[in-house]
Amino acid sequence: MTTQIQAQLYLSDQRGCTETAYVRSFHTLNFGSYFDEYRKPFGSLTTLNDDTLAAGYSLIKQIDQQTSVVIIPVVGGLEFDSSVGHGFIQSGQAQVFSLAPGMELTIHNPYETNVINFIQIWISSSSTHFLPACHPVEFDLSLKNTLLPLFTLAAGAGGSRQPINGFIGKYAGRQNGFYQSETADAQQPHGVFAFVLSGAFEVQDRLLQTGDGLALTNVGDQRIEFEALSNDAIFLLMNIP
């Protein structure tokens, strides 16, 4: 028996926003002092921020629970310094951190005049096998019309036995695609979260534009279909127990 997929839209123009003289952060989910009853964490996905940081400034994040943090530069590159490593990443790369309570992550804009824009994804973990670490990821968006692997977090994240996988893809207009979990566990609730970085998509018959998100629950092993509605449209897709 197929369970009906349930959906919740997170529209870009309804996101929370934190802004200072040097940083502007849009929050798809609740973050910091921003709270909305309809933007609570989606399973173990606790944070999805779209941040713009002024030249020469830094952001410092304190970690208060076991968390995997994925940083994806969108415009420009960034320097990072953390309790588990430091370095530089730019467009076409990402960095995945596994951070324990009490650890710190600093993101720095190294440019003299240019702002940078990047995505922050935080996924909580209750795994007993959690080990602090960081590692880089490279992806080639010139390989269009395919979902490229972005990260895999070990089974046990969020208390689940199945891994959490993230993908990124760049699609030409009117190109179709689909995602079907190969690890869905019938005994575990399972969802998919899509977020549009640029352009427009139709995902499960719902229109998503830049900055929009879509949470799908009761997915199981069902196929998630999407279509790019603009050329060079880019989006993220994550399976979330």
Image (cartoon, rainbow, N blue to C red):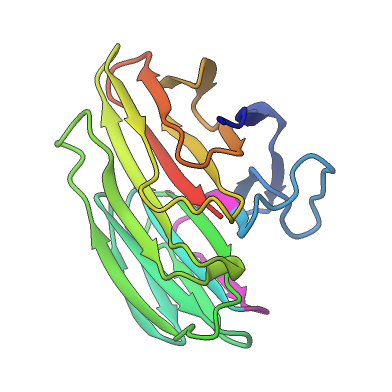
Name the image quarter holding residue 102. Answer: bottom right
**Which of these two is toward me, 220 or 235?**
220
**Which residue is at 45% across, 85% downward?**
132
| Residue 2, percent from left and from top | 55, 30
The residue positioned 35% from the left and 46% from the top of the image is: 167
Tell me residue 8's x, y (percent): 67, 31
Q: Tell which of 15 and 76 is nearer to you.
A: 15
Q: How many marks?
A: 0
Q: Within the magenta stretch, is there residue 61?
A: yes
* Percent position of residue 174, x then y: 30, 11
Query: From this viewpoint, is residue 110 visible?
Result: no
Above or below residue 130? Residue 142 is above
Magenta-colored stretch includes residue 230: no
- Residue 151: quarter of image: bottom left
Q: Is residue 117 left or right of residue 62?
A: left
Instruction: Name the quarter where the N terminus is drawn.
Output: top right
Lateral position of residue 220 relative to residue 154, left or right? right
Question: What residue is rendered at 61% in x and 60% in y?
Answer: 44
Which stretch appears magenta?
Answer: 48-65
Q: Position of residue 188 (x, y in %)?
A: 59, 55
